[in-house]
C-alpha cells in the first residue's frame, strides 16, 4: 500500500495519541485537520480510519499500518543517531524524510543492523517487528545490546536505553557513557565488560540496556573464554 | 571549559537572575540548576522569589534544544572535554598479552574455577585462620593463661579475691565476678573469646577487601542472591556476618533499597553464624564429618529457603546489580592494618558496653529469679525438639551472647552426662538459627524500630524450633545415630 507522506504522518499521530498516550477520543481539531483534507480521504479510502462526526478512529488494518509507520519513524531516528551520528537537533526533520524511504523488508534489515532496539532516542518504544523474534542474525548487526555480544567483541557504547531510570543514571555517573570503548569479557554468571581501563560487572537487566556499536576485531581468539554462554550462541547461529 | 552554545546562553541568562550571594559562583549554581539538582532548586526558589519563575522558563527553553536530559548533555560535554585533555598528554601503549593478575581475575569470575577458589578461600580463611588459629590457639592462650578461672590465671583470681574482700554481699559480688559477673563473663568473653576470633576475621576480611576479591565474589553469586531478594552486593554484609553479625547488620546500610536492608538483616539474624559461634560449633562438630556437613547444609538450606520466601512476601522490586570490578592487587600491609585496627576499635567501643549490659541483665535476671521462670518456660520447647532440660539454660543465655550458648553447649557435650551426637546437632542447628545476640537485637532495633525487631524475633523463634523439631523427627524416623568423637 502506497500512502502519501501526509497520510502516514496522520497515522503516526493517531498511534501515539491513541495507543501510547491512551487518549480516549481524537477529534479533527486535535490533529489540526478537517474531514475534507485529501490525506483524510486517502486514509478513509484505504479503510485505515473510521470517522463518526468529529471523531477519528483507527480500523484494525489502520492500527497495523500506523504501528508500522511509527516503527519506521523510530528506527530511522535510531539509524541516524547510532550509525550516521546525526546531531539531535537535526534529527526530527531528517527522520521524517528518511522513514518514507524505508519499505517493508528494508525496515527489518535496519532493525537487525541496529540490534533490534527497543526504544527511539527520545525513549519512546519501538513496536517490535517479526525480525525481533529471530536470533539468527548475529553476524549482520552493526549495533547490538550487550547481552547479544560475544565475549571479546569490541565496540563503542552507542546509547543507554531508558536513560530516565535511576540505575542507568548511576551507570553514567560511574563512567559508562555513550562514545566510550567497550569490550565484553564474559556473559555468565554476570556480564563483565571493560570500559576504558575499568572493568564492571552487571546483571542481565542492566546489560540489556547498553547498546554497542560493534567494531570488528579479527585477531582476538581467546581459548579462555569458551564459556557456556558463548557456545550456546554459536549453536543458535547455525 | 565551554559547554554547548544553548547551555552557555542559559548560564548567562540564569546568572543575570541570581541576585543574592551564594558561596558558589553563579556559573556553578546555574549548572546545578540545569542539572536539576533538587537542593539547589529549593534554595534558589527560596532566595530569588519571583526571579525563580524566570529561571524555570530559561531551563525549559534550554531543554527544548535537546532530546536528552540536560544532565546527560552536560555530562557528555564534560566527557568530551576530559577526553580532549587526556588525549593531549596520554599515550596508551599496546597491551602486551594478558598479565598474571588479569588471568587470575578471569579464573575467579569463571564459575568452574571460581567456586573451587571460593571454597579454598573459605577453608583457609574461616577454618584455618579464624577457626583454628584465632578460635583455637589465641583463645586458649588468652582464656586459659591470661584470664584463667577462679584458681589459675593472671586476671580472674586476683580480681575475684579483691572483690570478695571489699564487697561483703554475695549478690553484689556476683555482679562483678563469679560465673556471670561483668569481669568474669562480660570482659572475659569480650576480650579472651570474641576478640581473637573477630580480630583474626577482621584481618582476613580486610585482606580480602584490599585484594579486590569481593566484587568478583559478588559477580559470581549475583544470580543466587537475586532469588533471595538481594543482589551480588549483598555478599559483603553476608561475608562480614561470618565475622560479627552485629557489624554486618550495620553494614547493610550500604544496600540500596529498604527491602534489601530488611531481608539482609533478617537473614543475618537467622542463618549466618558469627565467628564466635562457628569457632565453637565447628570445633565440636568437626569431630564427626557427617554432623558438620549436616549442620552446614541445614543452615545454608534455611538461608536460601527463608530468603526465597521473604523475597516473595516482602513487597518491592528486585534490585539490579552493577559493580565496578577493580584489578586484583596485592594488599598494602599498612592499609590492611589500619582497617583492621579501626574495626577492632569500633568493636571494642561499641560492643563491650553491650557485653557489660548483658552481664548486668543476666545478674538481674538471676537475682530476681526471672531467668528461672523463663528457663522453666523454655523446657517444654527444648523437650519438644528432643533435647534434655539442661539445654534450656544455654539457649536463654544464647540470647545474651550467642557464643556463650555455644560454649556452654560445648561443656554439656564434653561432660559425662553429655549430649548425644544427634542432640548436639539439633542444639547446634537451633542455636544457630535462634534469636540474634542482644547486641545485634539492639542494632536491629536502632535501624528498623522495635516493631520490626520483635516481629523478626518471633519469626526466627518459630523457624528455629520448627527446624529443630523436623530434624529430630527425621533423625528418629530414619533411625540415624550420630556420634561425637
Image (cartoon, rainbow, N blue to C red):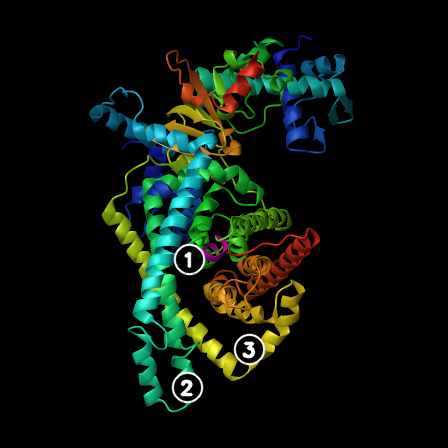
| Label 1 sits on residue | B247
| Label 2 sits on residue | B172
Q: Alpha-carbon neighbours of circle 3 within 10 Å: few (<14), some, or many (≥20)? A: some
The first of marks 3 and 1 along the sequence is: 1
Closer to us: B3 or B238: B238
In the displayed structure, B151 sits above or below B423; it is: below
Horizontal relation, residue A178 to residue B441: left or right:
left
Which residue occupies 42% across, 69% down? Answer: B354
Main SS of the magenta part reads helix
Res A87 visible: no
In the displayed structure, B70 sits above or below B99; it is: below
Horizontal relation, residue B345 to residue A85: left or right:
left
Q: Alpha-carbon neighbours of circle 2 within 10 Å: few (<14), some, or many (≥20)? A: some
Q: Chain of mark 3?
A: B
Mark 3 or mark 1, whichever is nearer to me: 3
Quarter of the image for the N terminus of chain B: give it.
Answer: top left
Do discs 3 and 1 share a chain?
yes
CA separation in Å, label 1 and label 2: 32 Å
The first of marks 1 and 2 along the sequence is: 2
- Magenta-highlighted residues: B282-286
| Label 3 sits on residue | B371
Q: Alpha-carbon neighbours of circle 1 within 10 Å: few (<14), some, or many (≥20)? A: many
Q: Position of residue A217 (x, y in %)?
A: 39, 14
The first of marks 2 and 3 along the sequence is: 2
Mark 1 or mark 2, whichever is nearer to me: 2
Cβ–Cβ under 8 Å for marks 3 and 1: no
Horizontal relation, residue B266 to residue B283: left or right:
right
Amino acid at each position: 500500500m502506497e500512502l502519501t507522506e501526509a497520510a502516514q504522518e496522520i497515522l503516526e499521530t493517531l498511534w501515539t495519541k491513541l495507543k501510547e498516550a491512551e487518549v480516549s477520543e481524537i477529534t479533527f481539531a486535535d490533529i489540526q485537520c478537517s474531514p475534507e483534507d485529501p490525506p483524510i480521504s486517502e486514509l478513509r479510502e484505504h479503510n485505515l480510519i473510521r470517522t463518526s462526526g468529529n471523531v477519528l478512529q483507527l480500523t484494525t488494518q489502520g492500527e497495523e499500518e500506523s504501528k508500522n509507520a511509527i516503527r519506521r519513524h523510530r528506527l530511522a531516528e535510531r539509524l541516524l543517531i547510532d550509525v550516521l551520528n546525526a546531531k539531535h537537533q537535526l534529527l526530527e526533520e531528517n527522520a521524517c524524510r528518511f522513514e518514507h524511504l524505508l519499505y517493508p523488508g528494508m525496515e527489518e534489515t535496519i532493525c537487525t543492523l541496529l540490534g533490534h532496539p527497543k526504544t527511539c532516542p527520545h525513549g519512546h518504544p519501538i513496536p517490535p517487528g517479526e525480525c525481533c523474534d529471530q536470533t539468527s542474525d548475529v553476524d549482520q548487526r552493526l549495533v547490538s545490546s550487550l547481552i547479544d555480544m560475544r565475549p571479546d567483541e569490541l565496540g563503542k557504547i552507542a546509547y543507554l536505553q531508558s536513560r530516565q531510570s535511576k540505575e542507568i543514571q548511576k551507570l553514567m555517573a560511574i563512567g559508562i557513557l555513550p562514545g566510550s570503548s567497550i569490550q565484553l569479557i564474559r556473559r555468565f554468571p554476570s556480564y563483565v565488560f571493560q570500559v576504558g581501563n575499568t572493568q564492571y560487572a552487571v546483571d542481565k537487566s542492566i546489560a540489556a540496556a547498553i547498546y554497542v556499536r560493534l567494531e570488528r576485531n579479527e585477531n582476538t581468539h581467546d581459548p579462555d573464554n569458551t564459556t557456556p554462554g558463548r557456545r550456546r550462541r554459536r549453536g543458535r547461529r547455525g | 571549559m565551554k559547554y554547548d552554545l544553548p547551555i552557555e546562553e542559559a548560564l548567562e541568562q540564569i546568572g543575570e537572575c541570581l541576585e543574592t550571594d551564594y558561596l558558589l559562583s553563579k556559573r556553578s549554581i546555574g549548572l546545578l540548576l540545569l542539572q536539576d539538582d533538587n537542593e539547589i532548586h529549593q534554595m534558589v526558589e527560596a532566595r530569588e522569589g519571583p526571579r525563580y519563575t524566570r529561571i524555570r522558563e530559561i531551563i525549559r527553553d534550554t531543554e527544548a534544544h535537546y532530546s536528552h536530559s540536560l544532565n546527560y548533555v552536560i555530562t557528555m560535554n564534560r566527557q568530551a572535554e576530559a577526553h580532549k585533555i587526556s588525549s593531549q598528554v596520554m599515550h596508551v601503549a599496546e597491551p602486551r598479552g594478558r598479565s598474571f593478575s588479569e588471568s587470575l581475575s578471569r579464573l575467579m569470575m569463571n564459575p568452574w574455577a571460581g567456586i573451587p577458589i571460593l571454597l579454598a578461600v573459605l577453608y583457609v580463611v574461616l577454618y584455618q585462620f579464624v577457626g583454628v588459629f584465632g578460635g583455637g590457639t589465641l583463645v586458649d592462650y588468652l582464656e586459659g593463661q591470661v584470664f584463667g578461672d577462679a584458681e589459675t590465671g593472671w586476671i580472674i583470681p586476683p580480681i575475684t579475691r579483691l572483690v570478695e574482700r571489699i564487697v561483703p554481699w554475695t549478690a553484689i559480688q556476683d555482679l562483678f565476678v563469679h560465673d556471670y559477673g561483668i569481669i568474669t563473663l562480660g570482659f572475659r568473653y569480650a576480650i579472651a573469646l570474641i576478640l581473637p576470633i573477630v580480630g583474626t576475621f577482621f584481618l582476613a576480611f580486610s585482606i580480602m577487601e584490599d585484594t579486590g576479591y569481593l566484587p568478583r565474589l559478588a559477580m559470581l553469586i549475583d544470580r543466587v542472591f537475586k532469588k533471595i531478594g538481594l543482589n551480588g552486593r549483598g555478599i559483603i554484609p553476608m561475608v562480614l556476618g561470618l565475622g560479627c553479625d552485629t557489624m554486618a547488620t550495620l553494614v547493610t546500610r550500604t544496600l540500596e533499597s529498604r527491602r534489601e536492608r530488611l531481608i539482609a538483616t533478617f537473614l543475618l539474624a537467622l542463618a549466618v553464624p558469627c565467628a564466635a559461634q562457628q569457632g565453637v560449633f565447628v570445633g565440636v562438630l568437626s569431630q564427626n564429618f557427617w554432623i558438620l556437613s549436616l549442620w552446614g547444609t541445614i543452615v545454608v538450606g534455611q538461608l536460601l529457603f527463608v530468603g526465597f520466601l521473604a523475597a516473595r512476601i516482602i513487597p518491592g522490586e528486585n534490585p539490579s546489580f552493577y559493580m565496578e570490578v577493580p584489578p586484583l592487587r596485592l594488599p598494602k600491609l599498612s592499609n590492611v592494618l589500619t582497617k583492621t585496627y579501626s574495626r577492632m576499635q569500633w568493636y571494642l567501643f561499641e560492643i563491650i558496653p553491650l557485653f557489660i549490659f548483658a552481664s548486668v541483665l543476666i545478674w538481674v535476671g538471676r537475682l530476681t529469679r526471672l531467668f528461672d521462670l523463663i528457663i522453666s518456660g523454655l523446657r517444654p520447647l527444648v523437650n519438644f525438639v528432643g533435647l534434655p532440660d539442661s539445654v534450656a539454660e544455654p539457649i536463654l543465655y544464647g540470647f545474651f551472647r550467642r557464643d556463650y550458648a555455644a560454649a556452654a553447649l560445648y561443656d554439656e557435650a564434653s561432660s559425662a552426662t553429655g549430649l548425644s551426637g544427634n542432640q548436639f546437632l539439633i542444639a547446634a542447628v537451633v542455636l544457630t538459627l535462634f534469636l540474634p545476640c542482644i547486641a545485634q537485637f539492639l542494632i536491629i532495633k536502632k535501624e528498623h524500630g522495635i516493631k520490626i525487631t520483635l516481629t523478626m524475633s518471633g519469626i526466627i523463634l518459630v523457624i528455629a524450633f520448627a527446624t529443630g523439631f523436623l530434624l529430630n523427627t527425621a533423625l528418629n524416623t530414619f533411625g540415624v545415630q550420630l556420634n561425637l568423637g
